[in-house]
Image: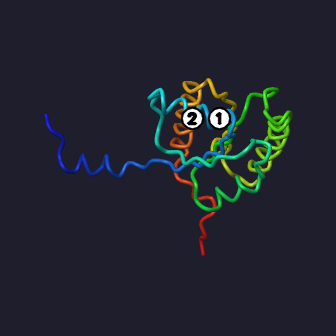
Amino acid sequence: MTESVIEKKVKKKEWTPKIIAFLCNWCSYAGADLAGVSRIQYPPTIRVVRVPCSGRINPFFIIKSLMDGWDGVVVSGCHPGDCHYISGNLVARRRFAILKELLDFFGIHPDRVHFMWASAAEGERFATLIKKATNLVKKIGPNNSFEKKW
């Protein structure tokens, strides 16, 4: 049985989130690369920003991304204790724990921002985490928190 034209249009207009992902060069970016080379499927909803270390990500980048209309933000780095810059990911973990509380105070849904750890050898884990983040952002819907309403 073939789909009607209306059903096809409805499927085309199905909303997909825009997610910006800040990935550590040494682990998470390499994990994403491994997922791609291994042909492990994950949603094409993310746009990657490669950073030297998750500890170098200013929390303002996350807030600014949400203000600019991104539906979700993913920050991923080396597992705690395995940072190529000794303690960068530990700094990031403390910073983002405080940022999560601040975003909650601002009324931004906590599932819009995701922090995760994935090593260079964990392509499958990276893909799973991206699928999970995409599904959570999809449930919330488009980011309208910063739209001007006047």
Which residue is identified by label 1? 28
How far across and how far down the image is residue 18, in percent? 52, 50
Amino acid beneath label 1: Ser
On screen, residue 49 above or below 68: above
Mark 2: which secondary structure?
helix
Instruction: Tell me the tag on residue 32.
Output: 2
How far across and how far down the image is residue 5, in percent? 19, 50
Q: Is residue 41 left or right of residue 133?
A: left
- Please say if the residues under marks 1 and 2 sit with CB atoms less than 8 Å apart: yes
Quadrant position of residue 93: top right
Q: Write the residue at 66% across / 40% down.
A: 114
Closest to the observer: 132 or 81?
81
Q: Is residue 6 left or right of residue 21?
A: left
Q: Write the residue at 55% across / 28% down.
A: 128
Q: Write the residue at 74% across / 28% down.
A: 79
Q: Residue furthest left?
A: 1
Q: Write the residue at 76% across / 44% down.
A: 100
The local crowd at label 1, few if under 14, some if 14 to 19, many if 20 or more residues have their Cα within 10 Å, is: many
Image quadrant holding the C terminus, namely bottom right
Marker count (numbered): 2
